[in-house]
Image: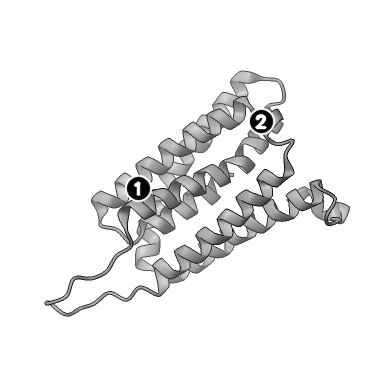
Amino acid sequence: MAADNAIIIGLIAANFAPKHRKQIIMYGVLAAFIFRFIFALSATYIFEFPFIKIIGGLLLVWIVNDLRRDLFEIKKIKSPTKVSKEPSYIQSVYKVLFADLTLSFDNVIGVVGAARDHFYIMIFGLLLSVILVGTLASYFAKTIQNHKWIGYVGLIVIFIVALQLIIGGMADLDIVEVNVKFKKFL
């Protein structure tokens, strides 16, 4: 469940020099931990509101489109008189924070659901997911830099997560009806 966070952090960090890439990943991991902790403590209350899932999914769609532009439409200028244009560092940090906020929902649901009433298992699961986010994000950032096609795959994965959140929220509000076989994916 940590892979979606790691993919989006890796996608965002891939366009930066190693120093900034490490900082973006660090902010992403820290935010993932904080959001997961807060959501885990208030999971039963927060997830009673289906519109939160819908808003989170819509935010992810916006982030996917923004990342697509950052990764594939910004052309590096090779002329020595002009500076290459890279995405804004601050905007990228905000994207990571929004992504962590949104993607922490599904992770906390999974961990809290698996832990049931065992608090220590829940804490262990949340810590493990944050560790996985940090290690996988570094890997994805380096790999995406060398193989842009992996960026497309990552964007598709994040878009699917966004659709799951939106459809899950709409199903909770009885706006759409989901076949029983597909409910396990929401």
Looking at the image, residue 26 lies above or below residue 118: below
User: Horizontal placement of 94 versus 65: left or right?
Assistant: left
Front position in the image: 143 or 84 = 84
The residue pinned by badge 1 equals 24
Could you say whether the residue bearing mark 1 is in a helix, strand or loop? Answer: helix
Binning the other alpha carbons within 10 Å of mark 2 as few (below 14), some (14 to 19) or many (20 upward) gives: some
Could you say whether the residue bearing mark 2 is in a helix, strand or loop? Answer: helix
Distance from disc 1 to disc 2, alpha carbons, whole Å, reads: 27 Å
Front position in the image: 12 or 47 = 47
Residue at x 40%, y 68% (from the top left corner): 71
Give the quadrant of residue 121. Answer: top right
The residue pinned by badge 2 equals 43
Residue 6 visible in the current orientation: yes
The residue at the far left in this view is: 81
Q: Which amino acid does label 1 sit on?
A: Ile
Residue at x 87%, y 52% (from the top left corner): 180
Q: Answer whether labels 1 and 2 touch (C-beta < 8 Å).
A: no
Question: How far from the left and from the top, in percent, is residue 87?
Answer: 33, 62
User: Horizontal placement of 88 versus 7: left or right?
Assistant: left
* Quadrant of the snapshot with the N terminus: top right
